[in-house]
Amino acid sequence: VPVDPSELPWSPTREDRLRARDRARVHRARSARKPVWLLLLLAGPGVLVMLGENDGPSMLSYATTGATYGIGFFIPFIVLTFWMAYIVQEMTVRVGIATRRGHAELIFERFGKLWGGFALVDLLGGNLLTLVTEFVAIRAGCAYFGIPPPVAVGAAVLLVMSALATRRYMTWERSVMALALANLLFIPAALYARPDVAAIGHALASWSPFPGGSRTELLTLVLANVGATVTPWMIFFQQSAVVDKGLTKADLLQGRIDTALGATLAAIVAVAAVVAAAPLFAHHVDVSSFSDGADFATALRPYLGSHGAALIALGMIEAGLVAAMTISTSSAYAVGEVLRVEHSLNLDFSQAGRFYFAALGSTVVAAAVVLIPHAPLLAITLTVNVVATLLMAPALVLLLLLANDRTVMGSLRNTVRQNLFGGIVAITIAVIGAVYGLSLALAQYGARP
Amino acid sequence: VSPLEREHLLGLEPELRGSARREAYPPRRLSRPLVLLMGALRIYVVCCMVLVLVTFVKVLHH
């Protein structure tokens, strides 16, 4: 028998109804003591953010690392960078659960319009530029299979739109997660390289052999690998997704496991990309002129075979596509939060027009830029690296301040240990980011004195 | 709404309702060390912006 909605103590929206349904499933799983099912229901933001950050430029960084230095120091180093990513992202889970607010919204409220404006401009500008690089990766990966750029980019835009058209957070999240699992294609690609398991184990245990050769090149790859692991959009995305999914204090453990699982999967994939590209190092192939995933796939074909090379190209397409979906959504959340308008993937287009417009608008603009003949894509890619790494420091400081804010965090505020780890990570990333940004800028001065 | 949906809605924690109805937190009062930290961050951000702009123009020109 239908019930009159006016009987309810408040007027529910579509967002409320769908979230209530999701929460009821969580309550049932918890009451029935089904921990695995409960985790499956609550996992999502952590896995998505970590696999989303294994995006086009990041996978290129890992492939370049493998091709330049082979298996050695960088294997454990990459694992360490994902531990750093876990430390940062775990804070966003707690801040999201404790405050029920996205990162942009919270910065506006607690630190005022200046810092709120900075955070928003930093995020939206950085995201738009990063989206362009994702479409570059998609275009390059598709080019390997002979797909023309307009078809590749157009199909990618349609997929992003299709995921948003579900107007259901859980469906969007599960669809993107299913797609993100294709990130694991780098693992069979690595197996085609017939890796020396003992050498990988030795590298993990001993952090050796330490790379020789040019110190500048080594430093650049160290910095690029750190920059490929923690970026500002990840902070904004996971906090907003935790809020939209409706995680509560009771779900903190699952939120942490989700983040750790995402970091583990992403680290394995990153290491697999290094291993898959290692034959280029063994055969002394110069990769300094390689600009995209198609170059790597083509160069690796003699060593991995046509199937292995195709997996690399497919992995690059997936990396760009999943990142395009998550990054455009993080922009939409931030716009909705700051404008104080409805912002949820559980809403209809008519109820959250500005939210969906921000996601679709940024996607379409980025896709269009990639198709413009002679567009300065290299300049954009370099600028993305500079922006992401330089502006990570203030983003981390603001996150640490929020995670220590007694008024908003209550009992979930950072402990001494979490501050110690968070502080170490923030300082490390800030120093490395600043050095990376400066080295890139100075390299440009050096190129044209 | 159906009785089942009503039951779900009534079970929804109040803080999980809606996405634009929450009352804003008051602005944070910053202690002196924090004021200094935020000031240093502002200078850092301005320098970064200039660096980013210069880098972009240089790369574009190159």
Image (cartoon, grey):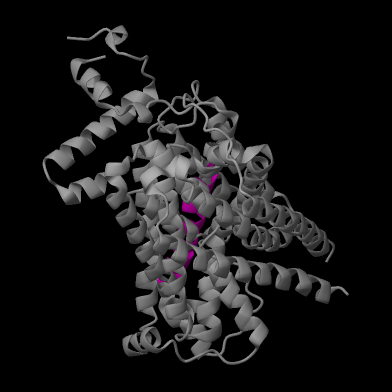
Q: Nearer the viewer, residue A199 or A123?
A: A123
Residue A419 location (% of width, % of height): 46, 61
Point 54% across, 56% down: residue = A138
**What range is drawn magenta here?**
A308-328
Point 34% across, 60% down: residue = A260
Q: Taking the image as drawn, is residue A123 in sight?
A: yes
The residue lying furthest to the right in this view is: A449
In this view, A110 is above or below A399: above
Splitting the image into 4 quarters, where does residue A334 fall?
top right
Is A337 on the left or on the right of A46, as rendered?
A: right
Point 17% across, 42% down: residue = A30
Q: Nearer the viewer, residue A240 or A111?
A: A111
Q: Is residue A317 magenta?
A: yes
Is A240 on the left or on the right of A332, as rendered?
A: left
Residue A217 location (% of width, % of height): 64, 82
Q: Nearer the viewer, residue A211 or A153?
A: A211
Residue A239 location (% of width, % of height): 45, 45
